[in-house]
Amino acid sequence: MIHTMRWFGPNDPVSLMDIRQAGCSGVVSALHQVPVGEIWTIDAIRERKNLIEADNGHFTDLNWLVVESLPVHEHIKKGLPDRELYIENYRQSLRNLAACGLKTVCYNFMPVLDWSRTALDYPLPEGHKTLRFVWEDFALFDLYILKRPNAANDYEPEIRQAALDKFQSMTAEEMTLLTNTVLLGLPGSEEAFDLNGFQDLLDAYAHIDDRQLRENLYYFINQIAPVAQECGINLCIHPDDPPASLLGLPRVVSTENDLLQLMNACPLRANGITFCTGSLGVREDNDLVKIIGQFGDRIHFVHLRTTKREAGTRNFHEAPHLNGDVDMYEVVKALIQEEQKRKIAGISDPQLPMRPDHGFQMLDDLHKRTYPGYSAIGRLKGLAELRGLEMGITYTFYPETHALSFANQL
């Protein structure tokens, strides 16, 4: 696989040199400064590309390989009449990215919120801090802070009671911390949603159910995938995180069946998947190795991380990359097998870009400002573990490939 890390731009506390020193050859980035729905211009794309590649003449090459993400406007997700304008802007952004040499574009179709957690600094026994999702804490926010109408219907009686008991003993500071965590904006953004206007965003989806959101997604992908394929771009949708309905909002990219419906809705290879083992792995009913076998040729980008489901609850936390609920050995082996299939088929770019997703806060990063889940040292640890696993599998099953790869590094 091609080893990459996400970089949020000039304001990212993790530098491009940090990413280079971690052993990456690729960078995953986006133009977070461009308002959602506006066209990414060639000048803006080239500026970011030149920034990433500026030191390539002096140090090991770094290249902008993946766009994560080119955001989808909420009016497209809601299927509003003016979605045609935003879809055309999206098409033009794809054309401009292709003109600058970008070939892989990640996006998601989660309504309102992107990924959701209830704690950003959950302590692990080793002293690391990690991300965590606690169902009763999310219920507490929904029921007693946001006070969403009819929210009680979405929670079991025992969860409602546990949330109420906790709410009644919380300090104002604890309520503010939970609110800010739930309403955190997109990764890479310094902004969060405002509680006062948040219910209005949810109300805009009041008449959009699972079926309608799927129809809006399939309409969108059928409008943009032909342009992407013509430009040589692979689109890859990111699964829902967590992979379940939240705040009464439908989520339609959570299961193997969701992926099957989406792939069938638009059979072009450009309509692909970001295979995120963390998001899909939260659900015990998702067989990750089976998903690779079924959709391998439509996987264009890989996020490797794992979570730990906490027994008897709907809670989970980010776990060490090799020690969570994901069988990372079998997953990485299946991905390497997919790359081998592509080589045999004569595909010119058989390697999958991969990034180690969501690292711990640990060591010196415990004392620094970092984007939640995107500290340098935690991701370095994850990448080192994954690279070792990948090398061991390749050496065992494909020794000739391993030998050639080693020779190319000398």
Image (cartoon, helix red, strand yellow):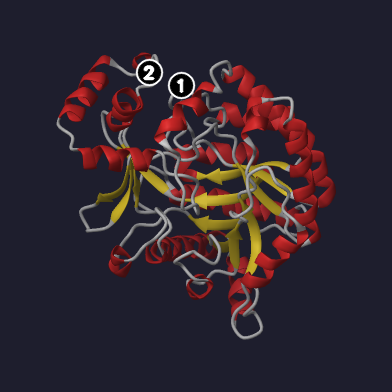
Q: Is residue 174 visible?
A: yes
Give the camera-side residue of 27 and 188.
188
* Residue 272 picture location, percent across and down: 68, 41
Q: Label 2's element? A: helix
Residue located 38% across and 66% down the image: 377
Disc 2 marks which residue?
151
Could you tell whether 165 is left or right of 410 in the image? Answer: left
Helix, strand or loop under label 1: loop
Q: Which amino acid does label 1 sit on?
A: Gly
Relative vertical location of residue 89 with respect to residue 40 in this rendering, above or below: above
Please give left or right for residue 342 compared with residue 286 in the image.
right
Please state the horizontal and vertical placement of residue 159, each as a whole percent of the image. 26, 22
Farthest right residue in view: 230
**Quadrant of the image containing the C terminus:** bottom right
Residue located 46% across and 40% down the image? 115
Q: Where on the picture, by quarter, is residue 103?
A: bottom right
Farthest-out residue, bottom: 58
- Residue in the foreground of this view, choosing between 304 and 5: 5
